[in-house]
Image (cartoon, grey):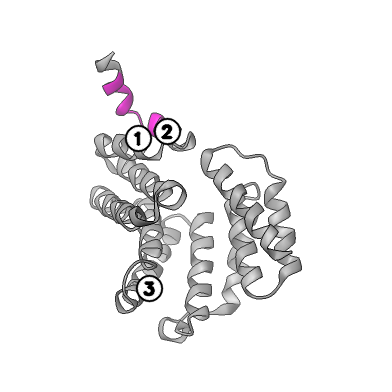
Amino acid sequence: MVLLSMGLAQNPATVEKLIDEGKFQEAYEAGLRLGNAEGLILAAKAASYFAGYQAKDNEKADWFGRAEAAARRAIQADADNAEAYFELARAQGRLSQYRGILESLGLASSIKENLDKTLRLNPRHAGARVALALWHHSLISKNVGWLYGANGNQIMPLFNEAIQLEPQTIIHKVELAGVLAAQGRKEEARKQYEAALAIAPKTAADRFDLERARRELAALR
């Protein structure tokens, strides 16, 4: 049984299944044990998911830091893997919320660089488009967009492209709704939340995203 468990830990599909089931800490450890680029990418994803969905507030920065470290190791293992750069950008984006203003702003250029690299390696990466849209929105909302070349005119096209590529991905619609709500476009936001809620969840992350959609939709009323 021990040997069987060790063998399963070496299987990326098993790590992905753990993530889908919401066993994010277990998936993180399994991905690290896998040790190659694919495993480290899954470890980074699992760590980010645990930080975002399940960790206590005082644990979040540590887990996003673990995601960042795993993504960096993945890039060292495979410098041409789009998902490695995406996971690094994801972790850095969330870490910027927990670091001082100067360090957070210093991460902005790195996040953009890693998302651009993701899209160069995989031009059809929908998640990178959503993250890039959020990058533009975040910097503009902080009134520092001009320092980094953020452009509000790119936000909606990026979201639209992502949703065209992955129309059944719940988080894309939820993130778009959040931006629309922040812009005061409540009716458009409501439609996006409702569209997200009409999609059947397939994973634990989907279920967490639907909970967020319900909570934010209720706050619009």
- Whether pointer 2 and pointer 1 mark residues with C-beta atoms closer than 8 Å, the reply is yes
Residue at image position (31%, 34%) is 30
Residue at label 3?
108
The reply, left or right, for residue 123 in relation to residue 215 is: left
Q: The residue under label 1 is which amino acid type?
A: Glu
- Whether pointer 3 and pointer 2 mark residues with C-beta atoms closer than 8 Å, the reply is no
* Segment colored magenta: 5-15
Label 3 to label 2: alpha-carbon separation: 31 Å
* Rendered-image quadrant of the C terminus: bottom right
Residue 128 lies, with reference to residue 31, above or below; the image says below
Residue at image position (46%, 86%) is 146
Going from the N terminus, do you reach mark 3 or mark 2 first? 2
Residue at image position (29%, 74%) is 103
- The image shows residue 177 at horizontal and vertical percentages of 65, 62
Crowd rating for badge 2 (residues with CA inside 10 Å; few <14, some 14–19, many 20+) = many
The residue lying toward the viewer, choosing from 16 and 18, is: 18
- The image shows residue 163 at horizontal and vertical percentages of 63, 56
Q: Is residue 8 magenta?
A: yes
- Comparing marks 3 and 1, which lies closer to the viewer? 1
Mark 3: secondary structure? helix
Crowd rating for badge 3 (residues with CA inside 10 Å; few <14, some 14–19, many 20+) = many
Q: Is residue 95 magenta?
A: no
Residue at label 2?
18
Label 2 to label 1: alpha-carbon separation: 7 Å
Mark 2: secondary structure? helix
Residue at label 1?
26
* Rendered-image quadrant of the N terminus: top left
- The image shows residue 213 at horizontal and vertical percentages of 63, 54
Crowd rating for badge 1 (residues with CA inside 10 Å; few <14, some 14–19, many 20+) = some
Q: The residue under label 3 is which amino acid type?
A: Ala
- The image shows residue 162 at horizontal and vertical percentages of 59, 58
The reply, left or right, for residue 61 in relation to residue 133 is: left
